[in-house]
């Protein structure tokens, strides 16, 4: 979509001087809702979201990119949003992930390490009649369908 590409370039322009921030995704929904997810290595502040929103909104209006009325929403990806970028995985090292693989398997464990091709997961595996043990598993990104961070309230 042309609108999404334009918005992505406006966001990148706005955060160019902030290397700790990164664009996760831009989505234009059928109900004319424009969603921008931006994150940071240490999170992103409300002030940063407001600044991005104003910058994008101003340029979209000025250049009349979207002809009908629309809602603009700028935020960090929510807790339930799947991880999309390698940088998001790196940010979540040490946290527990739930991973759905393309072959239908599910894995759950602590994220230990991230490379360009794989992630290293520590899973608690219980074999029949034996005590559960921690096992390190390498999971190639090519095998992953969806990954989400599990939130613990302990």
Image (tube, rainbow, N blue to C red):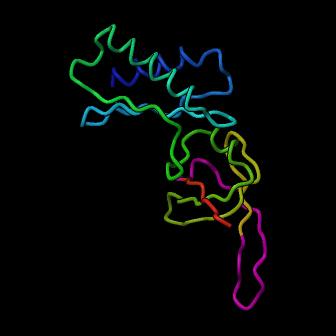
Q: Position of residue 150 (x, y in %)?
A: 60, 59
Q: Position of residue 133 (x, y in %)?
A: 78, 76
Q: Is residue 119 above or below residue 101?
A: above
Image side of residue 38 versus residue 133, left or right: left
Which residue lies most toward the front here? 47
Q: Nearer the viewer, residue 123 or 118?
A: 123
Q: Residue 125 falls in which quadrant of the image?
A: bottom right
Segment colored magenta: 124-146
Q: Is residue 34 above or below residue 123?
A: above
Task: Based on the picture, tell me whether residue 134 belongs to the magenta stretch.
Answer: yes
Image side of residue 147 versus residue 127, left or right: left
Q: Nearer the viewer, residue 73 or 125?
A: 73
Q: Residue 36 falls in which quadrant of the image?
A: top left
Q: Position of residue 153 (x, y in %)?
A: 64, 64
Residue shown at the point (50%, 62%) measured from the top left: 103
Q: Position of residue 138 (x, y in %)?
A: 71, 56
Residue shown at the point (51%, 41%) measured from the top left: 77
Task: Based on the picture, tell me whether residue 101 belongs to the magenta stretch.
Answer: no
Image quadrant in which the N terminus is located: top left
Image quadrant in which the C terminus is located: bottom right
Residue shown at the point (53%, 14%) measured from the top left: 13
Q: Is residue 119 above or below residue 53?
A: below
Which residue lies most toward the top here? 62
Q: How many marks?
A: 0
Which residue lies most toward the bottom here? 129
Image side of residue 68 versus residue 82, left or right: left
């Amino acid at each position: 979509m042309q609108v999404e590409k334009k918005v992505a370039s406006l966001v990148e322009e706005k955060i160019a001087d902030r290397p700790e921030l990164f664009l996760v995704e831009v989505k234009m929904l059928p109900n004319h809702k424009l969603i921008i997810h931006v994150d940071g290595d240490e999170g992103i502040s409300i002030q940063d979201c407001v600044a991005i929103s104003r910058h994008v909104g101003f340029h979209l209006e000025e250049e009349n990119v979207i002809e009908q009325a629309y809602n603009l929403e700028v935020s960090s990806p929510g807790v339930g949003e799947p991880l999309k970028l390698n940088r998001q995985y790196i940010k979540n090292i040490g946290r527990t992930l739930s991973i759905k693989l393309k072959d239908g398997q599910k894995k759950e464990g602590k994220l230990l390490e991230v490379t360009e091709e794989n992630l290293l997961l520590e899973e608690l595996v219980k074999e029949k009649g034996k005590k559960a043990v921690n096992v390190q598993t390498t999971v190639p990104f090519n095998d992953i369908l969806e990954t989400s961070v599990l939130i613990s309230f302990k």
